[in-house]
Amino acid sequence: MNGPRDWPAGGPRRRGAIRRTLPAALAFAIILGGLAYLGGDLQALIGTAPGSPRSAAATHRLYEESGPVDGRCDTLPPDPDADVGRTLRALSRCLDRMWAATLAEADLDYARPGEVRLVDRPREAACGTDDHGWAGIYCPEGRVVNVLVEEGRAFPMMFTLAHEYAHHVQEISGIADRRGSEVFDEAWSRRLELQADCLAAAALRTVGPILLREQRRWLARGGEEADGRQAESRESHGSGASSAAWMLRGQKEGTVRACNTWSAPADQVS
């Protein structure tokens, strides 16, 4: 017989659809509730939260399989401030050499940025044209390094170039991959940016050690506030004090391992 009674006559009566699915629905609701309640604790447990020593970014093989970055750049002009564009182009070639050698130690292929764009105004950049207040920006789509060239001493722009190159290294090595629950948020961004500060200092430690020290001290004294840096920028990039601390690590040790912000306690990447 077809119709509402679709079980055999005289046989055991089947449960209705609602009664059959209710236990599974309740179990699913309990799991979802548990996930929402545990949040970051569960992420830390399974190793996907930023700051977990088991996360993919914290356990990348580049930390263990590469040595100090070869920070020499013998092709810089005698007076870096005389022609900033020339200085930055020379440094770009050195950064390509440095990071190619470092990644090769971990059996990783290096690819140069798609473009290194030196711009006079933000609207000339490959991305971030509607943003304001940046000295440099990296565009993952197209892998373009952009540096804003302004009047003044060359070294701050050299550091910006090295910082954006560090983002390129994070991108091509896979450190910056967002896997599982590692979605972008401000905590993730701070670890990314502070690691780039540290890697930039590692690359420039023999190029301008005294100038690096001056920049660290300026940041540690709250230079970003004096320069009009907004609170939301600190949320995404970290405080001046944190930046100075990670730069010191990079300058002293010169290794990618010293720059592992991904496994650092939250108070070190604030």
Image (tube, grey):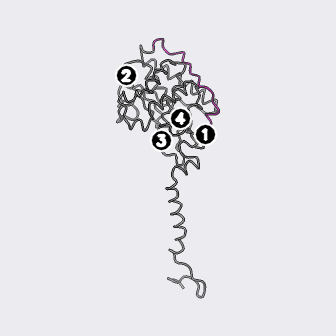
Q: Nearer the viewer, mark 4 or mark 3?
A: 3
Q: Nearer the viewer, mark 2 or mark 3?
A: 3
Residue 88 lies left or right of residue 107; in this view the side is left
Q: Is residue 17 above or below residue 107?
A: below
Q: Mark 2 to mark 3: distance in Å?
A: 30 Å
Q: Mark 3 to mark 1: distance in Å?
A: 18 Å
User: Considering the image in quadrants, where does the N terminus appear?
Assistant: bottom right
Residue drawn at x 50%, y 60% is: 33
Three-letter amino acid code at the position of disc 2: Glu
Three-letter amino acid code at the position of disc 1: Thr
* Mark 4 residue element: helix
Residue matched to label 2: 150
Q: Which circle marks residue 187 in the picture?
A: 3
Residue matched to label 4: 170
| Disc 2 + disc 3, Cβ < 8 Å | no
Image spot of residue 102 (x, y percent): 60, 28
First-in-chain label (3 vs 1): 1
Magenta stretch, residue numbers? 61-79
Question: Is 66 a magenta residue?
Answer: yes
Question: Is 259 a magenta residue?
Answer: no
Image spot of residue 8 (x, y percent): 59, 84
| Disc 3 + disc 1, Cβ < 8 Å | no
Characterize the local packing of mark 1: few (<14), some (14-19) or many (20 or more) Cα atoms within 10 angstroms: some
Magenta segment, prevailing SS (helix, strand or loop):
loop
Q: Mark 4 to mark 2: distance in Å?
A: 26 Å
* Mark 1 residue element: loop
First-in-chain label (1 vs 2): 1
Image spot of residue 153 (x, y percent): 41, 18
Q: Which circle marks residue 59 in the picture?
A: 1
Q: Which circle marks residue 184 in the picture?
A: none
Residue drawn at x 51%, y 29% is: 245
Residue drawn at x 62%, y 36% is: 61
